[in-house]
Each structure stands twice: as C-alpha cells, then as structure tokens.
Image: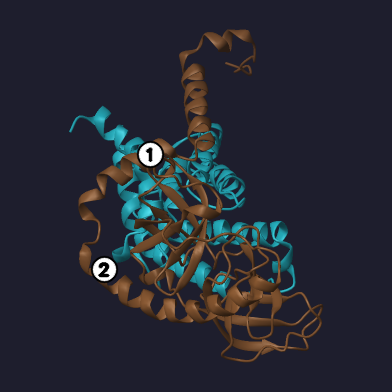
Chain colours: A brown, B cyan
Amino acid sequence: MIKTRRKIGFHLLFKSSLWYIFLIGILLFFIRWTKGSGYLEFYSVLVKPLLPGSAQKEWIMAGEDIENKIRLKLLEEDNNRLRKALSLRDFKADQRISAAVIARSSKSWWQQLEINKGAKHGIVKGQAVIGPGGVVGLIDNTTVLTSRVRLLTDPGHQIGAWIDRTKLHGILTGMGTNRPKLIFLNKNSFAKIGDAVTTSPASTLLPANLTIGIIQFVDENALPSPYAIVQLTASPEAIDWVQVLINNG
Amino acid sequence: MARDKKKLLIYIAGIFLPALLISSPDFLAINGVTPCWPVIWLLPFSLKNSPLKASIAAIFLGILLDSFTVGKVSYIPSLLLLSLIWARYGLHNKKIELFFNIGLMSIFGTAFVGFSFWVQKIILYRFLRNNWFHSWSIYVLISEIIITGLVAPFLSSWLLLTYKKN
C-alpha cells in the first residue's frame, strides 16, 4: 500500500498535542522574559538553611580592613582634588546591603554569581558589588528575592577604571581569567607593575576609588593602545558574602 | 514504579536542569568547570524521538537555560543542530555499544556547544577578535569535554534506559 504524505492544514489545530507544545512554548517564553525569576526565588528559599554562617562574616571584616586602608589614602587625595574641581558622584559607605552568594559560576562560559537579595531590598541593575578586597562585578538583573551579578572577569564585561598614580583612564575588560585587561585610552600608559587600579572618579556608573586590583604586566607597545593585565584583589571563587552599593544605581 | 511514570523521569530531569546549571556542584567539576548539562539531557531525548520533536525540545531547552545566564550568547543554535543530528542517528536496535557511543556522542556534542559559545563571543564582543585564541576558552572547553565525557555515559544512558522502556 502506498503511504501518502500527511496533509498540513487547519485540522492540526484540533490536535491536543499541538496545543500542549504551544502552551509549553508560552510558558518557556514567560520564563525567558522574567529571566527565570520564579525558579530562582524557589531556589533561594530552598538553599536558605545551607547559607554560610557568621565565621565568613568575620573573615570579610578582616579583608575589609586592608581594603579600607587603600581606600582611605585614595579618598584623601580625592578630597583634595574635589576642593578644586566640581563635585563628583556622591558615595556613602553606609548604604550597603550584605548578601550571601547562593550560586556561583566563576570558571565556566558565563562568569556570574547569584545573591540572595533582590528588588525587594532595593537592588537595581547596574549597582556595584564588592567583596573582601574590592569590586567583583555589577548587578546584571534582579528578581524579587535574588540578583544576578556579572563578574568583572566575564568576557564582554567592560567598566571604566584608572590608575591613581598616573591619573590615566582605561577600560577594564573581562577576559575569562582572574586577570582582566586594562586597555588604556592614551597613547602612553606610564603604568608600572604594582600600581593599584581603582574605579574612575569620572565614572557615572560606579562610585569613585573602589579598589579593583593590582597591575601585573604592562605592554606599552601594544597596538592600537597600550594595555595592562590586572590581578583582581577580590577573588570571586572564594567569596561567600558580598555587599551591594545601593546608591549608585 | 509503573512504566508510564518512568517515562516522566526525563521530563522531571529537564525541569531540574537549570538548578544543576546555577548550583554548579563542586563534586562534579574539573578545575571548577561542570559538565554540559543540556547535552546530557538532550542526547537520550533526541536518540529516542523524531527530529521534529527533538528540535522543538532543543529550542525549548535553549530558551529555558538562556534565562539563567548573563550576556547575549545563546545555547539555542548548537542544541538545535545537535538534536537534529542525534535524532537522525537514532537508536535503530543498537545495544551494548550504546554506553560507549553515548560517551563519544556527548564528547562531540559538548565540544560543539563550547565551540559555538566561543564563536558567538568572538562575533558579539569586538575586543575578543584581536585575541580570539584565548587560553580561557581552551581551558573551559577541554575541562567541560572531559567531565561531560565521564558523566554522560552514566547519566544519559540511565535516562535513555528509563525512557526507552516505554
């Protein structure tokens, strides 16, 4: 018997399987649209009892002391500059939210953290996230109870940074490793190994003078512009608690 | 467990895939890189189903998993192509060799998914074009291939066996 090809027509609309596929499709597009918010919130509630205890917080405090010493020196210099120049972006140290890391993907194709504080706590997209040692990333998106942090190391992630000693700006670009690349905007960087890299005071996205890392390597002859490899002072793999700066959103 | 209920296992596993993706369990990681979970799930599903069903599942899986990642790089193109190839390959009364076949297919599948991310990142992010052969991509690609090749023969063939019994 010869089998004829099945005809495509409106009678397919009466098949329940088609409607199942359509409904699943709508459901998945909804999940995509909400960036998996329902799923993530359920996950955050589920892992709440497993979050790290207070010992981690004490460790963060010790790490903060070192970070504060570097920042204090930078802030003093910045203050003097501010007296002469126009006012820069306001930054209040008390406006921080502590959050626990509930999921981490720091060595995969995507370099991100999920934290247990979200829109309900005042977190919005673009806010800076700091760990012990300095900046770790920016908020990429939020749900009611969770937020996703895009790490500085993620390829494609770029923020403005500068070297305080030389006062020269560059773009810090994630390269997938713990050592992002600082691409300078000037023809000569005058950078040296060991220089501290901080967020730029000219930045409209981030508060000024947050520690990012230390320069490990400089290529002055690179084209089209010189670059430096920066070792981050905050290691995303070892951080279980972070702080979100809520006044820069 | 009744046979009909066993069939549900693969769908339940599909729902839990994002949890595996975001939690990245350390005990199943090489150098911090976890297996390519969508390949482990899609392989048994595609082998048992028609190319159409497999490709629809691949698109849905891609949409679901893209919700949980940062950036513009997507799972969909690579998973779609893999689902079509695997569904064409099918089972066709293959027996014990399947255990090893699954390992091999998952290795090639993971390599393809990883390679597609690599290419997409180079296309999407201009600055990576100057330095496209970066160590990080090789590192993630090789680690992911090794760990998926080790895990897939167990998890994928188990999913396939429970799914096939219907």
Give how far across and how far down residue A76 sits, in percent. 54, 78
User: What is the secondary structure assignment of the residue under circle 2?
Assistant: helix
Question: Residue under mark 2: which chain is it in?
Answer: A
Give how far across and how far down residue A10 sits, in percent. 62, 9
Residue A140 visible in the current orientation: yes
For label 2, count other residues whose C-alpha is less than 10 Å away and answer few (under 14), some (14-19) or many (20+): few
Between the residue at mark 2 and the residue at mark 1, the CA separation in whole angstroms equals 27 Å
Give how far across and how far down residue B74 sits, in percent. 59, 49
Residue B14 visible in the current orientation: no
Q: Which amino acid, mark 2?
A: Gln
View extreme (front): residue: A83
Residue B3 or residue B133, whichever sits in front: B133
**Are marks 2 and 1 in one subunit?**
yes
| Mark toward the start of the polypeptide (2 vs 1) | 1
In-image side of A94 versus B159 (left or right): right
Say which residue label 2 marks. Answer: A56
Instruction: Quarter of the image for the C terminus of chain B: give it.
Output: top left
Residue B109 or residue A192, whichever sits in front: A192
Residue found at x 48% / y 78%: A72
User: What is the secondary structure assignment of the residue under circle 1?
Assistant: helix
Residue found at x 55% / y 50%: A249
Taking B124 as reference, is B159 above or below it? above
Residue A11 or residue A238, whichever sits in front: A238
Say which residue label 1 marks. Answer: A39
Of circles 2 and 1, the one toward us is 2
Taking B44 as reference, is A103 above or below it? below
Q: Which amino acid, mark 1?
A: Tyr
